[in-house]
Image: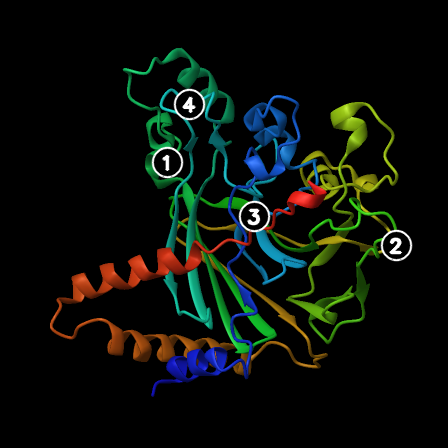
Amino acid sequence: MSAEARRLHECTERRVPWKRWGPYISERAWGTVREDYSANGDAWRYFPFDQARSRAFRWNEDGLAGICDREQRICFALALWNGRDPILKERLFGLSGIEGNHGEDVKEYYFYLDSTPTHSYMKWLYKYPHAAFPYVQLREETARRGRAAPELELLDTGIFDGDRYFDVFVEYAKASPDDILARITIENRGPAEAGIHVLPTAWFRNRWSWKRGSRRPSIRAIDGPAGASAAALDESMYGRRYLYCDAAPSLLFTDNDTNAELLFGAPNSSPFVKDGIGDCVVLGRTDAVNPAGTGTKCSAHYQMSIPGGGSAVFRVRLTDTPMDAPFGEPFAGVFRDRRAEADEFYASVIPAARSEDAKAVMRQAFAGLLWSKQYYHYDVRTS
């Protein structure tokens, strides 16, 4: 029995919760019926993309290459900024059903590359342009096209001309069911140096705003081991978790609360709201993040320039165990082991007689199925 098959067996027998954490976060949850409280059932207009960065979701979260626990209490995903976009890249952009000339249409390029059934190893790819993302062009040109016209795709805008984009690879490997390692590799495919901000982000789904008396969880900065930044996450079900970020980036804190002042003209209960980290990074508003180093949403902020053809690697660890040395060779060893175990598992699943190309297609197809799991909570009694 392979190592992954043993993990599956332990899950089936409910002995070891290897599936407690997985890719259960959608890349796009805005505009869905579960978040619709409109009078006429118009989900697209009620919760559009432009509100998603400022408005707390109730039933499920979204993010790039996101993972969470099976209750979606604690979430982790990646945010990016190329120094030119008007907003952080935190979730997939697309045209809503009323905007697309052929209906709903995501305008991004991302790929599920690998995953084991227990998510002990996962790999994901996103293609992020160097130039400002053409949000306005995609909307305006599509609005001019009728149903008989082809869709305007992101590639058609010329944004990837000259290979001026980043390949963003995100890999996860589990050292144990509650010890999750993340490795983010950014490769500059263009000929010239380009800058990028990389923001691995941990946050809590907002469960406290909907029921009076609910306990608010917290993330706060703590002293980290040498060469790392650290935060403690305290949550009523899971207790304490630790977020470790290699190379000691700055940590930015805000709350996963709706920016009611921006969206609805109502006062905010706190100056630190969901879009605070974006305002800090993109707009330079340092007052938008909590100087006390606490909140319900936290991003590690890495900033660097990558030469043409070059790459950079960022390491993060979300774990239930306090650690003096969360990175180094043992960290790399977990990735080597889990990748080898994934190869071993799929060698027993994919027919050996298939060509190498066919085997790769099958494995990536399985990855798509496994990455596409989503947490879905809709309580009719409290909706």
Q: Is residue 267 visible?
A: yes
Is the Cβ of the residue at disc 3 closer than 8 Å to that at disc 4? no
Q: CA distance from mark 1 to mark 2?
A: 41 Å
Q: Quick one: label 1, few (<14), some, or many (20+) residues within 10 Å?
A: some
Q: Hey, what amino acid is under mark 1?
A: Phe
Image coordinates of residue 365 in percent, x first then y, are 29, 57
Q: Which circle, 2 or 4, is nearer the viewer?
A: 4
Q: Hey, what amino acid is under mark 4?
A: Gly
In the picture provided, is 228 more to the left or to the right than 221? Answer: left
Is the Cβ of the residue at disc 4 closer than 8 Å to that at disc 1? no
Q: CA distance from mark 4 to mark 1?
A: 22 Å
Residue 100 numbered mark, or none: 4
Does dot 4 land on a helix, a strand or a loop?
loop
Does dot 2 land on a helix, a strand or a loop?
loop
In the picture provided, is 254 more to the left or to the right than 3? Answer: right
Front-most of residues 369 and 295? 369
Image coordinates of residue 356 in percent, x first then y, are 17, 67
Residue assigned mark 2: 292
| Model colouring | rainbow
Q: Which circle, 1 or 3, is nearer the viewer?
A: 3
Residue at 82% in and 42% down: 272
Residue at 50% in and 35% down: 93
Front-most of residues 218 and 277? 218
Image coordinates of residue 241 in percent, x first then y, are 71, 70
Q: Which circle, 4 or 1, is nearer the viewer?
A: 4
Residue at 62% in and 30% down: 47
Q: Which circle, 3 or 4, is nearer the viewer?
A: 4
Q: CA distance from mark 2 to mark 4?
A: 43 Å
Image height of 18 relative to 233, above or below: below
Q: Hey, what amino acid is under mark 2?
A: Ala
Does dot 1 land on a helix, a strand or a loop?
loop
In the picture provided, is 157 more to the left or to the right than 74? Answer: left
